[in-house]
Image (cartoon, rainbow, N blue to C red):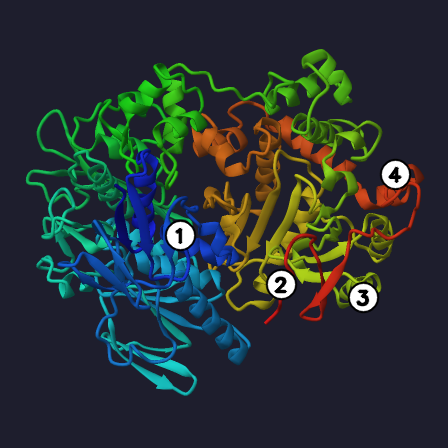
Amino acid sequence: MTRTLVVAGHGMVGHRLVEAVRAEDAEGAWRVVVLAEEPRPAYDRVALTSYVDGWDAAALDLGEHTEVELRLGDPVAKIDRAGRTVTTAGGHTESYDALVLATGSRPFVPPVPGADLPGCFVYRTIEDLDAIRAAVDSAKHRKRGRAAAMVVGGGLLGLEAAKALRDMGLSPHVVEMAPRLMPLQVDDGGGSLLRKLVTELSLTVHTGTSAERIEQDGDRLSAKLTNGTELDLDLIVFSAGVRPRDELARDAGLDVGERGGVLVDTSCRTSDPDVWAIGECAAVEGRCYGLVAPGYTMAEIVAAQLLGKEGEFPGADMSTKLKLMGVDVASFGDAHATTEGALEVVLADAVSGYYKKLVVSGDEPRTLLGGILVGDAGAYNLLRPMVGSPLPADPAAMLAPEGASGAVGVDALPDEAQICSCNSVTKGAITHAIRAQGCDSVASIKGCTKAGTTCGSCVPMLSKLLDACGVEQSKAVCEHFTHSRSELFEIVKATRITTFGELIAKHGTGAGCAICKPAVASILATVDTTEGDGGHILDGEQASLQDTNDHFLANMQRNGTYSVVPRVPGGEITPAKLKVIAEVADEFGLYTKITGGQRLDLFGATVDQLPLIWKRLVDAGFESGHAYGKALRTVKSCVGSTWCRYGVQDSVGMAVELELRYRGLRSPHKLKSAVSGCARECAEARSKDFGVIATEKGWNLYVGGNGGTLPRHAQLLVSDVDSESLIRYIDRFLMFYVRTADRLQRTAPWIEELDGGLDHLREVIVDDKLGICEELDAAMAKHVENYADEWRGVLEDPEKLARFTSFVNAPGAPDPTISFTTEREQKVPVLLGVPEVVSR
């Protein structure tokens, strides 16, 4: 007989419970009913701050359940334990055989007078962020400038909220009652460096104080702190921790913990044997856990019991590793050295921006008890699994950068070391999957063990374990070449091969594919401009190798039209050129948008219109912005010392010089850059592949920053260098990357995979350890000499121009599959089979 499982709550932990039950309930013993408070299915709340990047809620979805009855926006309001029913806020009654409370937690708002005024928000859900965004937009409209905000709480959640506000264009104040930021995770030394690093990223930090009162001041807010500081603000966000949602349990007469939370035993069962509680609402033997990994463990324990198995909560790994505005912060084990006889080993460098501490036992051999990493958490994946085990080397060696002399690797981990804390996967389980089950790639390990499928922080360790087990991981470009991209580059360079046909005939098999053809086309183009006399990307056989965007030198959009992006070096543009862009957009009926890289994008051009548009732009002095290519996109800049009272160098002039120097450089992946005129970092240089920040003495160069699905913060390569040295190091960095990176590999993972990482990169391009700097310099000089605008190259060649027609047999005829509608006074595409979006 089928029984009914009711799950109260559909957050990440409730989702995991249903996932686990459905995966193991092959007989269909349970009918699952989920009653959710939020108006949307479960989403990745851990990654909530990333919602600000694109305001796309779908990007946070955890996926849909099959064979589950899900009621959204109708939470459980009452439990009748005697009748074994629940009643929802909407009046719906549901009987249960088993009830699991997964109601999570609520934001804690300190009892500050005025905390309930308009303009005060909490930071917990997508709806919270939508409300904050609306308030920010309203404040910017009123001020017509930069709005001010305060975040109450300088812990993990508070800094996440501050990042979101900064990403919305604010410079937030962070108020933390403790004497340092993230007081639970880091110590005074780590907190001091963390404060320095986030202050450089446009945050103002107030520690050792709290909000005393909040008052309305016209359409703004006034906040007074206990240290006497007064702040004029547009909005306030409370992110000072959470409290378990245990009100349902209290009202139903279930036992609750002394400090809140639904009291459960180690099987996650409440004082009623038919009711369980999991996640942040549960107090396991009196203790609540505020991390997702312990919640996932609880969910799997309850799922096992529902299906007739046994399970006990083994305790929780409270380690944390995260990036706060690009700054690495990690803590694990006894981070604050509370164990009797504990010793601390500290390695700190404020100039390079890192603080590393290990806590070890006082006896021999030294046992690792815990640690703190700020600014550089690269050793976290190695160190965390060793907690409780004797160290295999001197503590200082354990903190040494990977690849450095004496550094310790993954071989030192015992089999019982937990590699994936989210899914409780040990090193032994992973090595068994590799050796006994034939897993020969990171993807196959994920599928077999679930390691790396949640937060992803352990993925680099999976690759290293494959290496340690002697599994050679293929770097072949595709099935037609056994070589990696860097090897193909060296073959082309050494043999002077100039065509794909010759390369695949001599060094590959078959006819090629959509993977290797564009990769080889990029290599041929790069070698041609850096080693040869230069040539057009569409010359001869090259044209047939390109993907759609490169083939038409424009970005294809959803409805089959193209966008045109002229280069605007450094974001600097004259009124006359702005006027030309406006005239072109008006004449051809193009949708126009300013991009995140300070350029103007013109959407909606058909293939046959592209040369006509280019002609108008080229005649006005514009050239291709290479928005379609794996090449340099933009060098973004602030206004620098020319206009800004904080600027210490001419960031616009440097950005223009860099963009004109590296334009058209074909590379393994797109390249983005920025130049900031001071440490306030308005151009966001540290999120770019190479970023430059002005100092009083010159320039700091950061490399390996990437946005996208896996954001990375750039690392400092050299500091306080003059302009000539700066350009020389960037030349070498880019040429070394172009020659050695894999296909579609961004600079951040490329640096991570270098043997020795950033230190090795510095040795190569600054110290000339490999003796190749002269060659790299010459190659870049050749590229600069050979640069030619690709749009102009098409306009001057009738044969290339002939390619740009929608229909070969009816040149100039409109494409009947393309149609538009109007939104916000601009045309937008009507997509076949997709409902039209109605503007509100």
Q: Is residue 205 visible?
A: yes
Q: The residue under label 4 is which amino acid type?
A: Lys
Residue behind mark 4: 800
The label nearer to you, 1 versus 3, is: 1
**Residue 123: image location, x then y, percent:** 35, 64
Tell me if 772 is positioned left or right of 74 in this view.
Answer: right
Label 2 CA crowd tier, 10 Å (few <14, some 14–19, many 20+): few
In percent of the image, x 24 and y 22: which residue is there?
A: 415
121 vs 156: above or below: below
Q: Nearer the viewer, residue 218 or 838?
A: 838
Whether label 2 touches label 3, CB < 8 Å = no
- Tell me where residue 20 sits by quadrant: top left
Tell me if 763 is positioned left or right of 386 in this view.
Answer: right
Q: The residue under label 1 is which amino acid type?
A: Tyr
- Say which label, 3 or 4, has the lower sequence index: 3
736 vs 198: above or below: above
Residue behind mark 1: 43
Query: Could you give the CA–CA distance between mark 3 and mark 4, rounded to whole angstroms?
Result: 26 Å
243 vs 624: above or below: below
Element marked by disc 1: loop
In percent of the image, x 75 and y 22: which residue is there?
A: 500
Q: The residue under label 2 is which amino acid type?
A: Val
Disc assigned to residue 837: 2
Q: The residue under label 3 is which amino acid type?
A: Asp
- Say which label, 1 or 3, has the lower sequence index: 1
The label nearer to you, 2 versus 3, is: 2
Element marked by disc 2: loop
Whether label 1 touches label 3, CB < 8 Å = no
- Say which label, 2 or 1, has the lower sequence index: 1
Residue behind mark 3: 586
